[in-house]
Amino acid sequence: MTKPKQELAEIVQPRVRAIPTERVRRWMQASTAWLALQEPEQLFPAIVTGFIEVLPALRAAILWLATPSGLQLAAQAGLEMPAQLAAQWRQIKLRLGEGVAGLAWQRETVIQQHGEHSYRELQGLASPQAQSVFQALSDLLPRSLTITAAPLRAGNQCVGVLELINTDTAAVDLEPDDLEMVASMIAAAIRNAQLYDEIRRSHQRLKAFDAVVTSISTAADLPDLVQSVLSVVLELTPANSGALLLFDPAQEQLQLSAWSGIDPTILACFDQVPVDASPCAEVVRYGQPAIRPLLSERGETTLIAAGVTAAAYLPLLAGGTVTGVLALFGDLEAISKIDKDMLMPICNQVGFAIANVRLYEDSQRERRRMHTVVESLAEGVLLCDRYGRLTLANQAAHELLEQANLSFEMPLATIPNLYDLRDLDGSPLTPDDLPLTRALRGETFYDYRLMRQYSDGRERYFSFTGAPAVNENGEVEGAVITFRDITANQKVQRAKDEFLAVAAHELRSPLAAVRSYADLLLRREQQREGDPRDIHGLTILTQQVAHMLRLVDNLLDVSRLDSGQLDLQYQQVNVVMLAQQVIDQQRPSAGNRELLLETETPELIVSCDAVRIRQVLTNLLNNAIKYSPPDSVISVRLRHALLPTNNTPAVLISVSDQGPGIPVSEHERVFQRYYRTPGRRGEGLGLGLYLSREIVQLHGGQIWIESREGQGSTFMVLLPIEQVGE
């Protein structure tokens, strides 16, 4: 080998260092011991102590752990300091680039500072709080120091920094490569301990969560729930006493619901006081936990007097809503060890449990109240679901249906008394006409009168009112009907109808004679231009007799309808001309009200009974005049239309006024026999609209009202152009 090549080989040949065998053995023992320790609180002190044992020349070893907010002291060995200074040192945090440890963390390499400088000067940049602590440590250490900081990396993650303090660099005898190797072993041990701690904490959380869920599921009521939850939580935490406070949003105050390990009189500052005056007001307002020392200015004087120094206030949340507060008490050291990350999921579960119990208790109270109301009704009440299964039946329903057993979810088809119903003429009902079937179909009806015939010849009459039960999406979820026995009322009604029919027949002839003579006397006085007072009196007499005859005719028409003897005489009628004749006839009684006829064509030919359709139009126009204010407009409109049942051609007649209107709840009732709208004044027996409906329905048409209170009324009549019978 030539000389240049020999020199080159000497240059590239690595330098081999001799490491004392004893030190290697001690490093291996230390690393094995570190890896065997899984508890962080045991591992961290062992690391710094073991480092000094291997390198006795070191003055001190400090272990910093990396957290999201900075480097935090985990353990130290070799530094003797007062307790107050040690407490201050535990509170400081170093950010990236602060101090020697922060610089090593930032650069991810070993950093060494040495010279004739104090500990504070060697640290470089740091926060004012850290600088004050470093200054206090400088007073305890020699001025000539060497500080070495090595980042602890486990894979791609820096878990902390190891800081070594020495007064003699040569005495340490630890090369940077060796230090990085040892740092990697320490980082691996720390990461293993952290993973183990995370697993242990997760296991503790699951165990605690399971214990709380078990106590919740076995609680009988709300007081039992909160007391059992508090007992379980106290077993899981270092707190020696606690209380559970429920929040009442209606009263804006907290209520002491459960306590343990403390006299309840000491907790008076929490019970039945406004939230803003409570020591945990911010927890209720913002839903965030608070762990702090007790303060007299926050109203915690009685707790301080009892020897309590700190408290943890944790909100009980149900979907973001605070239902209460969990208060844990003890000394500052014990309370600072409370794992709020473990307790908050538990508190959320408890919050939901409290909210659910409250909802259940509220629903039970409402259910009992509703049950009392329904059972106290004299009317029968039946509720069913969309599938026709019974969900509710009160005692009155049992008695009216003469059914001893009406059980929950009983199919309606198994209740024969609900199907053995007939109309008032005695004809059996089809299934589609049954009350519950109509309600399930989406219909709302009032005073639907039906009867039952018994084998012994008895008849019993019922009045049904029903409506569908609709959910928030507009879907029919079920139906409800109420019904009552109107047998006595029906008998009275029948007797009244019979009496009025007889009276009308007896009164018709003499009244007709009186009207004829009154008309004759009026014409004679008008022809010979008699005394105006006599003419006025005879005019009033004629009008009143005519009114009495109309009432009698209405009664006779009701009697004919009941006996099925109201026959219709069909003929081709121009309803436009018929409506004009009725309007001209009613103008004298309209006063200063304006009567208008609106039509799209001069001829609308309908096959109908002209006398009866005239009677319908007269009734509707007479009602409009009666209830319209002076100087208002009454409109009669005619146009072509279609019957909705079979799309056959029809004529739509509407009579509109500007009167007080009719409430929606009265729309069906105004067509009932003898019905008068409450609060309305006017002459008549309440038969005009009833007869109008019967006449229109006999023609195969429809009649209804469109009105709202205070907005006038419009009566609509739909007549088919051709009759099916023809």
Image: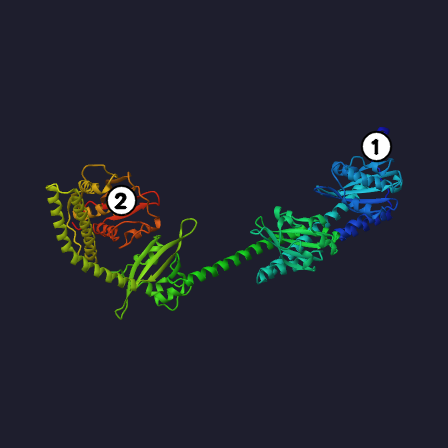
Q: Amino acid at mark 2?
A: Ala
Residue 24, x across and y down, in percent: 84, 47
Q: On the rendered image, what quadrant is the N terminus found in?
A: top right
Q: Amino acid at mark 1?
A: Ile
| Residue identifier under label 1 | 11
Q: Can you tell which quarter of the image residue 648 is in?
A: top left
Please indicate, yes or no, whether residue 153 appears anywhere in the rendered image. Answer: no
User: Depth check: 25 or 514 in front?
Assistant: 514
Residue at 57% over, 63% down = 220
**Mark 1 burial class by Cα count in 10 Å: few <14, some 14-19, many 20+:** few
Q: Residue furthest top?
A: 4
Residue 86, x across and y down, in percent: 81, 46
User: Depth check: 221 or 136 in front?
Assistant: 221
**Mark 2 burial class by Cα count in 10 Å: few <14, some 14-19, many 20+:** many
Q: How many numbered marks have been drawn onto this rendered protein structure?
A: 2
Q: Secondary structure at mark 2?
A: helix
